[in-house]
């Protein structure tokens, strides 16, 4: 039995027919929509490499059944930059060496974007480490990741102040 769903992924609408109701969002993104930025790490929700935003909330795509997302808006790492202009979190990860091998980086960045949007980042490194604890880095680039999240939080707050001034 097939199921039809409509998703908005990175601002583009997709009407999809799912032949298997057990397909995860991660597999749908990678195999059907050719969005391979979200990585399949553990495939059990323990590493965070597959983190995306669903309706603005951080979510492990490997644990989310695509069939449950009819009408949802999904943002992946491919949807963050504005053309050639990097999202402030992406720029901060580069500036602070917030990655080494890069495998976890898309999930780390998406989690950081969500953490900042939730108002949970702040400027306390311990608070950021706790908020990012669902994203593991095999290379232990945690110091750079924490610095990048603090810097991106500051950059985004400054941008908001300019817009609201």
Image (cartoon, rainbow, N blue to C red):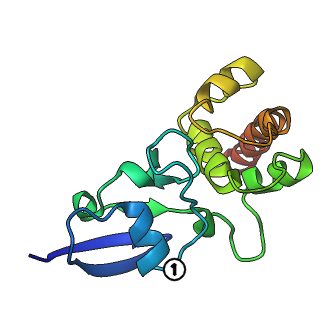
Q: Position of residue 1 (x, y in %)?
A: 8, 76
| Quarter of the image with the C terminus in it | top right
Q: Is residue 96 left or right of residue 5?
A: right
Left or right of 133: which side holds 2?
A: left
In the image, taking residue 132 as reference, residue 157 lies left or right, namely right
Give whichever of 155, 15 is nearer the camera: 15
Q: Is residue 142 visible?
A: yes
Disc 1 target residue = 34
Closer to the camera in the image, 87 or 52: 52
Q: Classify 29 as above or below 52.
A: below
Question: In the structure shown, which secondary structural element does the residue marked by tag 1 occupy?
Answer: loop
Image location (x, y in percent) of residue 114: 56, 43
User: Toward which corner of the image does residue 115 lie, by quadrant?
Assistant: top right
Q: Residue at x 58, y 68 (%)?
A: 79
Q: Residue at x 82, y 45 (%)?
A: 98
Q: Count the marks.
A: 1
């Amino acid at each position: 039995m097939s199921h039809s769903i409509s998703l908005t992924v990175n601002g583009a609408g997709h009407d999809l027919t799912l032949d298997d109701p057990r397909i995860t969002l991660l597999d749908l993104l990678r195999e059907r929509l050719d969005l391979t930025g979200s990585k399949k790490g553990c495939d059990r929700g323990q590493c965070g490499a597959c983190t995306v935003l669903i309706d603005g909330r951080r979510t492990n795509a490997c644990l989310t059944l695509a069939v449950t997302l009819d009408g949802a808006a999904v943002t992946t790492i491919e949807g963050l930059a504005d053309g050639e202009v990097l999202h402030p979190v992406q720029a901060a990860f580069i500036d602070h060496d917030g990655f080494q091998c890069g495998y976890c980086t898309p999930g780390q960045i998406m989690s950081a974007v969500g953490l900042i949007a939730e108002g949970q980042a702040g400027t306390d490194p311990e608070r950021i480490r706790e908020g990012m604890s669902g994203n593991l880095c095999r290379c232990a680039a945690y110091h750079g990741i924490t610095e990048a999240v603090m810097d991106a939080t500051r950059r985004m707050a400054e941008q908001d102040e300019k817009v609201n001034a």
